[in-house]
Image (cartoon, helix red, strand yellow):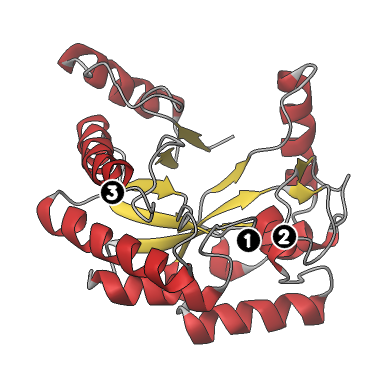
Amino acid sequence: MNAFQIFTKNSNQWAAKPIGSEDAAAFREAVRRGGFKRLIAHTDYLINPASANDVTAARSVESLRQEIERCQFLGIDMLVMHPGSHGGTGQQEGIRKLGAALGKVLGDAGRVTILLETTAGQGNGIGNTFEQLAEIVEKSGAGRHRIGICYDTCHTFAAGYDIRTRDAYERTMESFKRVMGIERLRAFHLNDSKKGLGSRVDRHQHIGWGEMGLDPFRLIMNDPRFHDIPKIIETPKEGNPEVYDRINLDTLLGLIDSE
């Protein structure tokens, strides 16, 4: 393990205890001692600037600004967020609101890069196609270094992007490159899927245990374009999560070609 993802606050509450200077210094020192190459944070699950509820949307913008400040204090340079849900107003309105919110927040605050996470396309969610994500970035007006993409393998598979064979993998990555630019892909969430291709259902599974199988992960782990990109598992945590996390990590490492 040489990369990790954290929440800097409770993931299901708006309120957050301020991070003290001593805690921030201790965190930075622990990262240094641990020899970690990359670390990223994830926003709380309440943040939804695309919301049809104006109060929720405004609160989300302020909370996102605070999350960026917390990342800067801890020395974390990438922050993953879900694009959210339009709440019934339609995809285009949700995309417009999220793009405007990102432009405002990133124009006001810091150097942290926001990573929009690919989504499965459940319900009123936005961000389940590369084209939607590109439109959000375009509407934000933010520079190329301020917004990237976190590619969740379960979500994109459920959204209809197949990477189970070499040919399918290359087609999907070429599509991402054409629409987004491959340099936008800044992190992976490596999760198998309990549901099938194009199901639009977000259900994570252990690596190789689900509908995707091992081949997609072998392709990612051996793709030289992604050698230095952090890869995070968000596999199921029921039962004994430490045991299963070790199994999943060992599985991924075992897929790397010895050459």
Q: Which residue is mark 2?
A: 200
Sequence order check, earlier mark of 2 and 1: 1
Please say if 230 is above or below 163: above
Residue 22 point in image, percent of width and height: 20, 12
Q: Quadrant of residue 137?
A: bottom left
Front residue of 181/117: it is: 117
Residue sitting at x 43%, y 76%: 134
Kind of residue sitting beneath label 2 = Arg
In the drawing, what numbered circle is on residue 54?
3
Front residue of 33/145: it is: 145
Front residue of 65/91: it is: 91
Residue 150 point in image, percent of width and height: 50, 57
**Residue 46 vs residue 216: left or right?**
left
In the drawing, what numbered circle is on residue 121?
1
Q: Verify CB contact (< 8 Å) between mark 2 and mark 1.
A: yes
Question: How many residues crowd mark 1 within 10 Å: few (<14), some (14–19), many (20+)?
Answer: many
| Quadrant including the N terminus | top right
Q: CA distance from mark 2 to mark 1?
A: 5 Å
Residue 32 point in image, percent of width and height: 35, 28
Q: Closer to us: mark 2 or mark 3?
A: 3
Kind of residue sitting beneath label 3 = Asp
Q: Secondary structure at mark 2?
A: loop
Q: Quadrant of residue 47?
A: top left
